[in-house]
Image (cartoon, grey):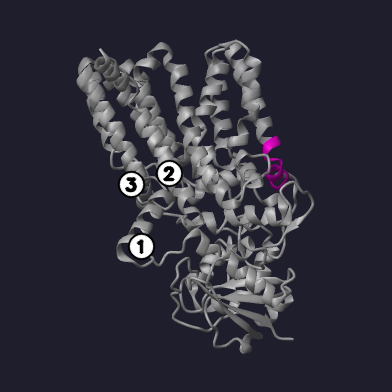
Amino acid sequence: MIKQAWFRWLTKYWFLFPVIGFLLFAAAVFFGYGERSYIGVHDNMDLFLAQFQMLKNTGSFWKHGVDVPFLGGVSRDNLPSELSLYSLLYMLFPTYTAYILGILGKMLLGMFSFRLLVKELLGERYLRVRPIVFMTGLCYGALWVFPAFGFAFASIPLCVFILVKIYRGQKAVGWWYLALFAYPLVSYFSYHGIFILGYLAVAVLWLFGRRDKKAVLRMLLALIVLAAGYVVCEYRLFSQMLLSDEVTIRTSIVNPSLSSAEILSEIMEVFKAGIFHADSVHGKVVLPVCILYFVINNGRYLMRREWKRMFRDPFNLIAVFIVFNCVVYGLYDYEPLRSLVERLIPPLEGWQFNRTIFFNPFLWYAALFLVLLRLYEGGLLRVWLANGIVCLALLTVILTPNRYNDLYATCYNRAYEFYHGAEVDELSYEQFYAEDLFTKIKADTGYQGEWAAAYGFHPAVLEYNGIATLDGYLGFYSQDYKEAFREVIAPALERVEATRIYYDDWGARAYLYSGTDLSIVSATKTVYATDDHIYIDGEAFKNLDGEYLFSRIKLSNAEEVGLSLVGEYIAKDESMTIYVYHTLS
C-alpha cells in the first residue's frame, strides 16, 4: 500500500523535483561563487548594471531635475524608472545580489504567471495536466532573455490572465482593474507595453463589431487603466518623449534598408532562431515538435474537411501570431514602411516597431503547451511522451550557451578552471568591475569627481566605480553632445570607415575608438590591440573638461595628444592592468 501511494504521489507531483532542484541549483551556483560568477557583458554589465550602481552611488534613484555623471552629464530621467520592481531590487540590495535575485525572480514570475493563466483557461482540467503546466512555465521563465527586462518578458502571461479575468467579468472586478493598473511595475512600455495597448485596442474594436456592449466597456476601461498605469510607472520616459524639446540621437540614427531577398532571409532566420535579446531557444526541441504537430493536426482537418475548426484552432492562431511577428521584424528594415510610421506618428521617430518579436518566446511555449496538453489527453503512453518532451525542452534551455546564459557560463568556466588548473580569458563579474583596483586608483590620484574616459574597456566600469565619464552607452541622449564628443574621436573615425558609420549612424556607444582596429573594447584578461597609439583630439577632450584617461593599453603617443602618465595599476590577481593618464596643463 505504501509503495502504491508513493507511486501515485510521484506520478502526480514528479515535476516538483526538477522545478525545485533547478531553482536551488541556480541559486547555489550564483550565490556560492558570488561575484566570481561569469555574467553576460553585452547590453548588461556594460549598460544597466553600471547605471543602477551609478544611481546608487549618487543617490539619484528618486531625484528629479538632476544629471548623472556619464556622457558629460545626462538627465536622470533618461535612465530606468524607480517605479519598477526590477529597479527596486537595486535600491534595496547590492548590485550583484540584486542582479541574481532578478534572474531567480524572473524564473518564478514566468512559471507562476504561466500557471495562473493556464488554470484560468482550463478550469478543472488544470489538475490533470499540472506537471506540464509547471514544467512549461519553468521553461519559459528560465529563458535567458534580456536580463534588465526579464520581468517584462516573464510577466506576459500574467497580463493576459488579468485581462481574461476582466473580460469574463469576474467577481470583484475592481480588484482586477487595480492589478492591471499595477501591472507596469513588472513590465516595460517600449518593449511590451505599447504593443499590449495596441492589441487591446484591436480587441475592443473586434468586440464592438460583435456588438458585445458589456465586454466592450470592460475592455475599453481596461485599456484606459493599463495606459494610465504605464504613464504613472514610466512617467520619466513619457516626460522625455512627449514634453522635452531636446533633440536626441534618435533623430540621427540611420536604420538599414534591406532588399526583398534580405528581408525574407531575415524573417526565416528569426522564425528559426529568434534574436539574442529574446532568445526563446526553440530551434532544437520546440520548433520541430510544433512543426510536426502543425502538419499532423491540420492534415486531419483537411482530410475531414473541417475548415472552420482549422481556422479556429488556438494552436493555429498562435502559429499565425508567431509568423506575423517575424514578418513585422523583417519589414522594419523596409525603409518606405518605416518612414511611413514615423511620419504618421512623429513622437515614435526611431521607435523599433519590430519589437513585436519580443512576444514570440511566450508564444512558442504557449504553442508547445497546447501540443503537450493534447498529448496528455490521449492515453498513458502519450502522457509520458509529453513529460519527456517538456523535460527535454527544459534541458535545452539550461544547457544552451547563449549570450545571457550566466548559469552555463559560470558552471562551464569554473569547471574548466578546476580541470585545467588555469583561469579562462573571460573576466568574471568581480574582475570586470575591479572595485578594489579602482578604489586604490582613486585614493592614489586623489580623484574628486573630475571628468574622465576609458580606452580599451567599457566606460561602464568607471561609472560603476564612481568615476564621472565623458563617454558611455545610452540609446537616448542629446544630439549636441554626440556631435561634441565626435570632435574628440574624429581622428579615429577618419581612419576606420566602419567605425565612422557605426558612430555616425547610431552613436549609442560614445566610446574612444581605435584608429586601426574595429574594436579594442575588451571584456577579457587579454587586450587585443594592434596599435598602442590613441587617436583623439586632445584639445577637444579638454574642451569637454576631460582630465583623466584610464587605459588598458600603455599609450606610446600620450604626450602628443596632451596626456601624461600618472601611474600603472595592476589588479591583485593580475586580471587587469590600468594605465592612468592626466591632461597636460
Residue 40 point in image, percent of width and height: 47, 55
Examine the structure image and report whether residue 235 is included in the region drawn in magenta.
yes
What residue do we see at 39% from left, 66% from top?
A: 423
Residue at mark 3 to residue at mark 2: CA–CA distance: 12 Å
Q: Earlier in the sequence, mark 3 or mark 2?
A: 2
Residue at mark 3 to residue at mark 1: CA–CA distance: 19 Å
Residue 362 point in image, percent of width and height: 43, 34
What residue does disc 1 label? 417
Q: Does residue 105 appear to the left or right of 250 in the view shown?
A: left
Magenta region: 232-241
Q: Does residue 10 appear to the left or right of 172 in the view shown?
A: left
Q: Are marks 3 and 2 in contact (CB under 8 Å)?
A: no
What residue do we see at 23% from left, 20% from top?
A: 302
What residue does disc 2 label? 26
When the figure is inspected, residue 346 is found, relative to residue 220, above or below; the finding is: below
Q: Residue furthest right?
A: 65
Q: Does residue 59 appear to the left or right of 500 in the view shown?
A: right
| Quadrant of the snapshot with the N terminus | top left
> Residue 564 falls in which quadrant of the image?
bottom right
Q: Are marks 3 and 1 in contact (CB under 8 Å)?
A: no
**Amino acid type of the residue that numbered disc 2 sits on in the rendered structure:** Ala
Q: Are marks 2 and 1 in contact (CB under 8 Å)?
A: no
Q: Depth-wise, is mark 3 or mark 2 nearer the camera? A: 2
**Amino acid type of the residue that numbered disc 3 sits on in the rendered structure:** Leu
Q: Earlier in the sequence, mark 2 or mark 1?
A: 2
Residue at mark 2 to residue at mark 1: CA–CA distance: 19 Å
* Foreground of the two, 569 or 460: 569
Q: Secondary structure at mark 3?
A: helix
